[in-house]
Image (cartoon, coloured by chain):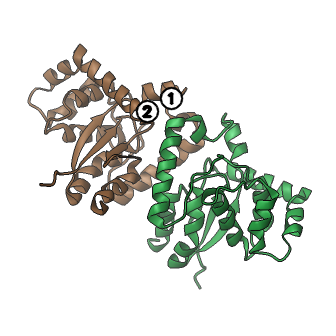
Chain colours: A green, B brown
Amino acid sequence: MTQTPRIEFWFEFGSTYSYPAAMRIESLVEEHGVRVDWRVFLLGPIFKEIGWGDSPFNLYPAKGRYMWRDLERVCNVHGIPFSRPSAFPRNGLLASRIACRYSDEPWLPQFVKSVYTANFARDLEIAATETIKACLAGCVTDPGKIIEDAQSPPSKKALRARTEEARDRGIFGAPTFFLGGEMYWGNDRLETALNSVANA
Amino acid sequence: MTQTPRIEFWFEFGSTYSYPAAMRIESLVEEHGVRVDWRVFLLGPIFKEIGWGDSPFNLYPAKGRYMWRDLERVCNVHGIPFSRPSAFPRNGLLASRIACRYSDEPWLPQFVKSVYTANFARDLEIAATETIKACLAGCVTDPGKIIEDAQSPPSKKALRARTEEARDRGIFGAPTFFLGGEMYWGNDRLETALNSVANA
């Protein structure tokens, strides 16, 4: 019996190119007969360790200007709504604690996409509890309880451990994928990763 | 009468992802009915201005480790020979002065590919005049004269001006392409750029 191959999808809520990856991954994996493990993490602590106190897209303005135009083109090609956020990067800590604590819940993908859409299509402040509560509303019956649980000490600890795992496995940006013992970085490597299954 | 669309291909001899772009661009543009303007430049001065004294792939080791594996995979997919160079990045100053001074010569693409192959497939020191002479040997009758001309004050000045133009146009990495008023960064945006012609 062959096991269904799994792709690990490591994403960060502030990461621009994680947005199209999150919106695309479900239909792509279905085409390829692959299952997704959704793995949220924080890039901030990883960037800090290499000496960056902000997103490289803010630290290096030429790269940032290009990224916004490129992201707009990428979203256009895939029919994904996009509107440049008025604040960048937004703080996704609360959303990340939820997505880490409830990694394997069936409603998780819907919540993740809802947070990304809030940030990158609706220009909403995802650091605000009210925004996250609204994102949860379509997913669970008691958003308030989920938010409370996600801020408990074990939930905070779990996200710190997740972020340490990301760093230890060589992750330096998002989105990052693992499949078949290989690491792939960037939204435009999602197809590359999945094609490796067909070619294996 | 419709003019043949042109793509500007900005490359740097030390840049790893410029290598597969240089090896692929001629057949791709032929398929799309586009002509190439080969535009060598130096990344070093641009990196220095943003505070990098070395390649980001050396400054950020996790990123560097990933890049070497990714580049190997990219070259494999396209059937491009690849062997990780024992020195990185190599100094492409002499090769760049030649490629700038002789930008529009019919032998230029052959020379550029020969230098990239020397660096990224044959692990040869492209800073050595002998290597560059050998690369020129298949292209021109008098490599010695080309090398001499390329080191004249006007040739040096032309490369400095070219690099300033790159920076002024917002280039922050290589390869970079311009087509139809849009900028595209990275080997994997070459198809995106060319497809924009078909969709125009």
Residue B141 picture quarter: top left
Q: Position of residue B126 (x, y in %)?
A: 32, 30
Q: Which residue is mark 2?
A: B89
Residue reaching furthest top?
A: B153
> Is A167 positioned to the left or the right of A161 in the image?
left
State which mark lies toward you, 2 or 1: 1
- Asked if the residue at tag 1 contacts the one at tag 2, i.e. Cβ–Cβ closer than 8 Å, the answer is yes
Q: Position of residue B53 (x, y in %)?
A: 52, 25
The amino acid pointed to by label 2 is Pro
Residue drawn at 31 percent across, 48 percent down? B179
Q: Position of residue A64 (x, y in %)?
A: 53, 42
Q: Which residue is mark 1?
A: B54
Quadrant of image for the N terminus of chain A: bottom right
Residue drawn at 39 percent across, 52 percent down? B189
Check the residue under mark 2 and report the chain it is in. B
Residue drawn at 77 percent across, 69 percent down? A136
Say which element carries label 1.
loop
Check the residue under mark 1 and report the chain it is in. B
Any part of residue A174 in sight = yes
> Is A35 positioned to the left or the right of B73 in the image?
right
User: Rounded to the nearest whole Å, what is the CA distance between mark 2 and mark 1?
Assistant: 8 Å
Any part of residue A181 in sight = no
Residue reaching furthest left?
A: B141
* Placement of A85 over or under B152, stated as above or below: below
